[in-house]
Amino acid sequence: MKTLWRYSPLLLLAIGWEAVSRFGLVSSLALPPLTSVLAAWWDLLTNGELINNAGASLYRGGTGLLLSILVGSVLGVFMAWWRPVNVLVGPLVEIFYPMPKSALIPVTVIWLGFGDGSKILLIFLGCMLPVTIGAFNGARSSDRTLVWSARSMGASRLRMMWDVVLPSAMPELLSGIRTALALTFILLVSSELIVAQKGLGYLIGYLGADGAYEAMFAVVLTVAFLGFAADRAYQLLMNRVLQWRE
Amino acid sequence: MKQPSQLTAFAWRLAPFFSITLLLVAWESLARSGSFTSFVLPAFSAVVERIWNDAIGGDLAINTALTLYRALTGFIIAAVGGVALGLAMSRSVGVRWFFDPIISVGFPMPKIAFLPVVILWLGLYDLSKISIIVFDAIFPVVTATIAGIKGVERELLWSARNMGAREREMLWQIVLPAAFPMIMTGLQVALPLSLIVAVVAEMLMGGYGVGGAMMTASRFADSRGVFAGIVEIALIGFVLVKGMTLIRRRLLVWHQEAMEPSTA
């Protein structure tokens, strides 16, 4: 009941949407009624178009994000624990971090073409630095006394990284990954809107160019919902992983 | 412990330039080695030459000015609107009731997916580009403003009220300044976001602007033009983000964070 009350404004918005469109306050071309959007969504779901394109997007986003987490966290930890790496890589990170990553869309197309490869590379490049910076800040702030005692107890350097540095870097690393997750969706949808032959972003552009606005709205809402759901799921996971702190 | 000599200290300060030079030299020699075609990787010198020609021809000024204009206008509207909305949500129960679920559900959504809808409603010109930027950049500002106001210490409010501050004075002299560091953090998220969205909007809608110019270049297989665009937009991003850090340090001299060792 409480959640219903909390989210009732969203319900109001949905009813308002349906009403302005049904009563002809705005053209149903500009804003098709919510119910017809839902019907179009059902059609897209049953004829497999939604699933196919979502699969392509998920594969690209998942692979790119995973690569960026792997490479980014290793790079960040190394930067924190090895001064030459920091001196060499740090300035590059500082220069490329503020760059609007969407500018890389045409370059990745030049390098890898219109398919999956260019999207994966784009997401990997765009998401790596937030992860790197999260891992770097986290690992740098790990407790020196913990590290010293681990070393004096004879832990090898690698062992110490895994058992001491990584856990204490976890909170910052995880919040870096959360930024990367949001960026993944932005870059994925943008690149698919601009150049692609499949994927949810492509489907939005294709349906829009076709004048199938009900279906276009349906896919836009699907993408928005997926982004929201991914963030919520990640937050749950994050709380799980960080339970040991307290 | 031995003091590091002046020479080593100097060497460490020079180090950042070393790696950037290394990157540029690697780029140039890789491009000239012939292992890549000039389409895949144009030489750095060729890209610089291209930017120089654009600068003389006037295209550079038009494109960067338009991109900056769109991104900054969107950012400023999002900043003012976001702080106002966050303030209204902190003060009025009704506003909070209505907007809280919208903000918390809308924040993690990829708003860029609504770009075709915005084009459908507002056309292909600046209005729709700036609208999508505002739509994207306002969320971090609202959440940061609410968090900042929530974090204002009670004692501050009590003592101000005790000393007879009126509501208006409370707002401008106590609440907003105390929430300001947090608001600034929200703005520092919103600014790069505005640039990202500006570039995407320009790429999708074409026309002038760095994003549009890059798209035109890539359609004509003019990869020098594409790389020139990247270098330009990277410089713009760097200058804006660094400028924001400087502004923060300037404006928050009174805050204790200015005393802490900074990493930026």
Image: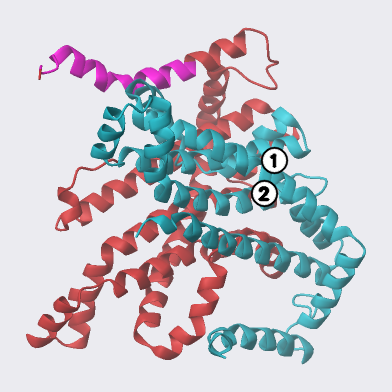
Chain colours: A cyan, B red
Q: Which residue is mark 1?
A: A119
Q: Is residue B155 above or below residue B130?
A: below
What percent of the width, then of the height, locates residue A144? 25, 37
The residue lying furthest to the right in this view is A47
Q: Give the mark nearest the N terminus, 1 or 2.
A: 1
| Relative to B215, A81 lies left or right | left
Q: Chain of mark 1?
A: A
What percent of the width, then of the height, locates residue B67? 52, 48
Q: Is residue B213 visible?
A: no
Kind of residue at disc 2: Leu
Q: Which residue is mark 2?
A: A188
Q: Is residue B33 above or below residue A71?
A: above
What residue is at 35 percent from the left and 57 percent from the top? B185
**Any mark on residue B152, and which?**
none
Q: Magenta segment: does it hold B19?
A: yes
Label pair 1/2, CB-CB below 8 angstroms? yes
Work out which quarter of the rendered image holds the C terminus of chain A and state it: bottom left
Which image quadrant is residue B112 in? Answer: bottom right
What whole-number distance in Å separates the C-alpha atoms at marks 1 and 2?
7 Å
Look at the magenta stretch and give its main secondary structure: helix
Q: Chain of mark 2?
A: A
Q: Is residue B16 above or below residue B69?
A: above
Work out which quarter of the rendered image holds the N terminus of chain A and state it: bottom right
| Classed neighbour count for the residue bearing mark 2: other residues with Cα under 10 Å, few (<14), some (14–19), many (≥20) | many
Residue range (magenta): B2-24
SS at badge 2:
helix
